[in-house]
Image (tube, rainbow, N blue to C red):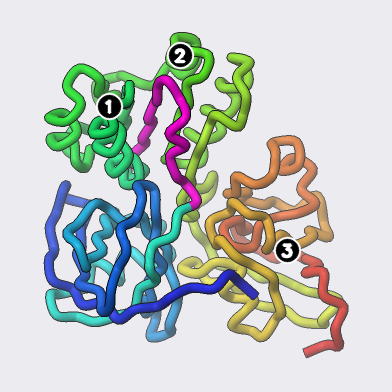
Amino acid sequence: MRSRQEWRQARVIDIAHPTEDVRAVTFAVNGPLSAFDPGSHTNIRVMIHDAPAIRTYTVLPSAPGTLKIAVKLHPNSWGGSAWVWSLNPGDVTEMTTPENRFELSWRASHYLLIAGGIGVTPIFGMAPALISGGQSVRMIYGGRSQAQLAFRDELETLLGDDLELFVEEEGRSFDLDAEFSRLPLDAESYVCGPIGLLNASKAAWQRAGRPMSRLRFEVFGDSGHYGESAFWVEIPALRKAVEVRPDQSMLEALLQSGVDMVYDCQRGECGLCAVGVLDPEATIDHRDVFFSPTERAQNVRMCACVSRAPGGTISIDTGYQSAPL
């Protein structure tokens, strides 16, 4: 089960490289395509090990009738980035019309945009929208090196002194407590990056005594505390065991094995795909932003769409009590 999506045929018409390890691909999409707000995403049909799969990417600003994504070639990818990097002009696939779960509120007196690595993709669309709307905005952008900061030149031209770069190789890192302490009371912050950045942002925001409704964040599912490894999932109620490959999510593996699941976002945000963990001592790499730190520490539930085990076997309860498959 999932929300309704509108799929369209899409053809690659342009490929660019904002950095050495980031590839921007523009698709011409069949049929009318409505304008979309910054922070929107699309789902795209990919092939991984000759099997169909779906991956989700932010859509960047692009010409009418097109959708553009930027994908980092990640060594721990679930296979989607490698597929995107294999595309050539003229190749055809299917994409959904954009939808947005990371939209700007347009209600704040000031906006702090925070991007870590390839998490810049939704922020890259927000910055020009806020500037053109006459909003007060500051952006902080972190990465391992200057060469790995995708869209740096465009953002520097757009934001000038309102953009500050934090490069690990130069010994600079975010001071989130200081950033949040300077914000007006009704300011909002939008954050996208690795799970460590999101957790640090939420903790600093709470320390600052700010309402959580004014901190918005987005995570990418391959950002975890462990590298991707194969593992097994046992479902005792169904007398079934399913292997999860390094390049697929637990949700995908369960669905492909015929296990009924409820799900929607596939981004660790909505919690619909959460399953019970039958062994609280099991090691779980929680990659969601749905559960609180306390709930993740209890280790009794996990989001099947993004969270995983670093190997071995975990035992779960999907919530369904149907007959064994």
SS type, badge 2: loop
Tell me how far mark 1 sits from mark 3, CA to CA. Answer: 51 Å
Relative height, residue 146 to residue 306 (above, below) = above
Residue displayed at 64% across by 84% down? 257
Residue 107 in magenta? yes
Sequence order check, earlier mark of 2 and 1:
1
* Residue 49 drawn at (x, y percent): 39, 81
Relative height, residue 197 to residue 18 (above, below) = above
Residue displayed at 17% across by 30% down? 158
Quadrant that contains the C terminus: bottom right
* Residue 293 drawn at (x, y percent): 69, 36
What residue does disc 2 label? 183
What residue does disc 1 label? 134
Can you see residue 144?
A: no
SS type, badge 3: strand
Give the residues in magenta: 101-117
Q: Residue 268's image quarter?
A: bottom right
Q: Amino acid at mark 2?
A: Leu
Q: Amino acid at mark 1?
A: Gly
**How many labels were placed on the picture?**
3
Residue displayed at 56% across by 20% down? 204
**Foreground: disc 3 or disc 2:** 2
Q: Nearer the viewer, residue 225 or 293?
A: 293
Relative height, residue 120 to residue 35 (above, below) = above
* Residue 324 drawn at (x, y percent): 83, 88
Q: Residue 194's image quarter?
A: top left
Residue 4 in magenta? no
Say which mark, if any, is on residue 314.
Answer: 3
Q: Amino acid at mark 3?
A: Ile
Can you see residue 165?
A: yes
